[in-house]
Image (spheres, coloured by chain):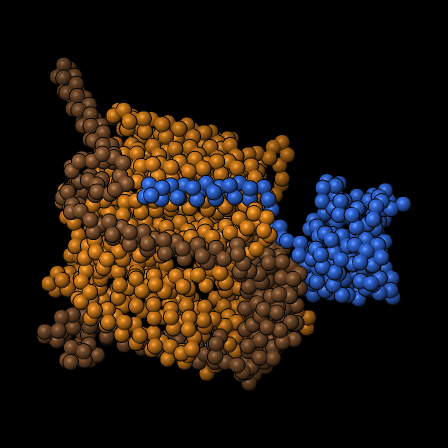
Amino acid sequence: MRKVLFYVPLVLFLGLSLFLLSGLFSDPRERDAVMVGKPLPAFSLPDLMNPAQTWTPDALKGQAFLLNVWGVWCPTCNAELGYMTQLRNEQGVRIIGLYYVLPEDPMFGQVFNLPVLQAEVATKLQQFGDPYQFNILDQQRRLSLDLGVSGAPEHFIVDAEGIVRAHHIGDINPQVWRTKLAAVYQQFAGGPQP
Amino acid sequence: MIPELGQLALTFALAFSIILGIVPLLGSFTANERALLVAKPLASAMFVFTLIAFCALSWAFYHDDFTVLNVANNSSSLLPWYFKLTAVWGSHEGSMLMWVMILALWTAAVGFYSKGLPLLMQGRILGVMGLINIGFIAFSLFMSNPFERTLPFFPVEGSDLNPLLQDYGMIIHPPLLYMGYVGFAVSFAFAIAALIGGKFDSTWARWARPWTLAAWLFLTLGIMLGSWWAYKELGWGGWWFWDPVENASFMPWLVGTALIHSLAVTEKRGTFKSWTVLLALGAFSLSLLGAFLVRSGVLVSVHSFAADPERGVFLLIFLLIVIGGSLLLYASRMHSVRSQARYEIFSREVMLWGNNVFLLTATLVVLLGTLFPLVHKELGLGSISIGEPFFNQMFYYLNIPFALLLGLGPWVRWKQQKAAPLLKPMALVAVFSLVVALGTMAATQSITANLALLGLLLGAWVGVSALMEVYQRLQQFGSLSQGVAKLQASHYGMTIAHIGFAVMIVGIAMTLTYSEERDVRMEIGDRVVLAGYEFELQDVYKLNGPNYGGEAAELDVRRIDGTYVTHLHAEKREYTIQRMMMTEAAIHARLSRDLYVSLGEALPGNAWAIRVYVKPFVRWIWLGGLLMSLGALIALLDKRYRRKSPNAEAAHA
Amino acid sequence: MNRFFTPFLIYCPGSAVPGVPGSRAVSLTSLYAVLFSLFMLSQSPAVLASETTATTAMNVEQPAAVAAPQELQQFDSEQQRQLYLKLTAELRCPQCQNQNIADSNAVVAVDMREKTYELVQQGLNRNDVLDYMIDRYGDFVHYQPPVNRVTIWLWLAPVLLLIGLFLLQLKRRATQMAPPETYPHNSGTGLTSSAAATTSHPHDTYPHVSGTKEMGTDRDEVNKITESKIQLNKELDQIIEHYRSKKS
């Protein structure tokens, strides 16, 4: 018995090493997708390009869609615009943008200016491609907070009843779409769209 | 040319380390004296070449050689020269080279200062250290070469040292910390040598003690400096965050503390051998684990270097060999060793056993808190975070019995202690602790703040007990003056170190309870009052530093009765190259409290966000750490470590 | 009775009450204790004048009668402010390299701080606010893990370690009570070897006779032999050197 006890530190260490090894290949900052299975939070936000129009969760229901949190200030978002446009055109994926506005910096005299923003967005979409049916403007970032968004780009797959089915932090590229999101979207979109 | 010479020097060092790792150990098995004798010159040679490599890299930094990748990534021509040299260890590759050099330094030091050691043992110890050196030098040379060139294209200007690191703290904290981390390799080597040789007697313990004390000294200083530096640098008045990298340095410290105490028992009574050996193996193993955690990207930390799974795998394999191998050796050799010493339940042995137990439990708490999120996630159970609330809670509970034991321990005799003679002194200590604690609480007009009261009580218990005990011991020599000269340095060291611990607990408890902060919007001329002090914003102007811009604020501080206290200067720097904002807080330090002001962002209407803190007793935390290091230093100077012949040594009462 | 009262009287430093052992120590220490308390009293007017502490005050902070700058965040009560400070210290920034939301300037941290402020103003308590954030960002965002069947080990394991080690020590006591020593007591002079004779532990697999040495000391013999070999080699070298010099 005493002899066995002396092997305990070794055994504990070997066990720990297994976890260390597997930890080397995983992302320590990965968060759980707690929104999956929950309905979209309540919100009432204007359309980016057409502020007179207001979007609510009910208005988005009826068809599954990919919700993309993005901004022109985010280089990774710009990089994925091309692929997402491809998804829209070739596979008929319904993509809705949630525009994440960065806070204004008073030290630089920045003030929120909608027309300027609309122009910037239009230029960017023209340059890289426009995958969006429309863009929802989240100026106060309240909807983003309710969705558990910590930055851009982030993606949600929402089904026709407005329940969140997937949450992906990071950009979408062919590999991510294929391995993680395509199946979920297919499942809730009800087959390929014409 | 110089960087290539540096790389060549590192290769030579690797060669020497390989020979050092093999030859003396073989010599110890075949009784070849020449093979054993070659260990010391090999160690010295290895150190010289790692030093050359380190100097070569420093030269490249000093001369802004941006053709070297490491220099280009971590320095700039705008840096002041002392920060250029500091940037040498500002990256993974550079700090790894410093680790290598310090390890070689300790190895050479063991070679030089071990004349009293039997040749056989010396050979084994240096051989084991050589083996460890092989791993690190190979890692540095093959997986994180600091001398890599950017040629044929090279940048005109470097990316600058991270502004957070452009501070005096960066000049001393990493070197001291590494000296501590790496220093435990010596105790590790002693333990392995003992396991190989089968000899765990008190002579072995006596030789191992000064090396362990020295490493512990450096580690204590390094951790204290890190805490002080974070407090000064980060701008929010915090001094410990239970960040994984901080924990990675704290765990070897906890085990190292247990080790120095356990070595005392092994030296004086010939018992606790399996504890001592395991702790010696554990301290360095935790240092290695710490190095792995910081450099592999397994955990999220503000301190961690950029992640690279390949590096991580190499380090993990190294860990498996060193730690796994040593623990295997321990398990297979140690169970047959038994010590003969007997001791009663109430004896110093049991007190020190209690010390070991609590320190080990604390180490487990820190280990769990640091690694459990990883394990939880790898098991597929989701992502959790473990931080300050958990650690503070556990340490609160662990510290209470630990401090109580600390106050009692030094009074208890070896082998057997009758309770009766201790009742009076202990009662007195208790009474005076209460007086001190309650007196302080009365002064602060608060009896309900539990944490502060508890910290004061425990701190006073430990401190008063240490003072009374040393006083009583001095008296036993006849008169005080006689006693002062005769009492060994190690006893003084113990008293001072224990007082240091008491001071630290008091500081922590008081600061946690009584710290106050205010976050206000101030225009020039505004005043804010906090904890009896009035802060008035006098001026804010633009900054123009060597590699930064930004703003500075000037404040006047008075007491509420009007007496002038000091003038404060706070800055918010914007480092131009890395485009990073940095707060240089204004601190007015006194033993009783710190005044801490940090300048925030500019607000509309010609105002600024200013954060004002009053932090009572926060200096006591670092003062306590300094006292602990001082205690270790004094204990190191004990005459018996300088004695050549062990025969003259008598067992201590 | 005398012995109980004398410690509480302050004598001149160094004086002693005859017949009371340790009274000098006592008088000195009592003097130190009083001096120390006086030192504490004098050292910190700030602490003396401390208006509120974390656990006592409930009133709103009243600044002095000068231009009172606006608090960046106004609270209805000191309690609310403390709650806000506590929450922002224990909520983790989801985006950063291990920082709480109080210390981070990331956009999401700032947003979470503002939300926390809003919720505290609305009167939510600590658990409500934590639940709110965890519902949206997961357990990752709270620095205290949830207590469930898996995480309970965080608290159980250290306790079990403590208990386990205590039990081991008790067991050792029990076996120590057994047979008398067969070896001279280890006095720590540095010349005795480490592994002494065994006790009659029933599970021991090595055959032992009183006075037999164990594996550890077998190796000790090897060491001794090796050391004497080295000594012999040294002497041999010296002899060779001696003759060599004689030759020249």
Where residue C219 appears, as percent x and y from the top left, is 24, 32
Asked if residue B57 can be seen in this view, the reply is no
Identify the residue shown where x is 16% and y is 70%: C22
- Chain B in the picture: what colour? orange
C47 lies left or right of A70: left
Residue B343, given in percent of the width and then of the height, sits at 21, 53
In this rendering, position of residue C247 left or right of residue B182: left
Residue in front for this viewpoint, A119 or B196? B196
Image position of B331 with respect to C164: above or below: above
Q: Is residue B290 left or right of residue B643?
A: right
- The quadrant of the image that shows the C terminus of chain B is bottom left
Does any portion of residue C92 appear in the rendered image?
yes
Q: In which quarter of the image is residue A141?
A: bottom right
Give the x, y percent position of residue B151: 60, 32
Q: Chain C is drawn in which colour?
A: brown
Q: The blue chain is which one?
A: A
Using residue B227 as the reference point, say whether residue C146 is left or right of it: right
- At horizontal 63% and vertical 63% (from top left) the residue drawn is C133
- Residue at 38% x, 77% y: name it: B441
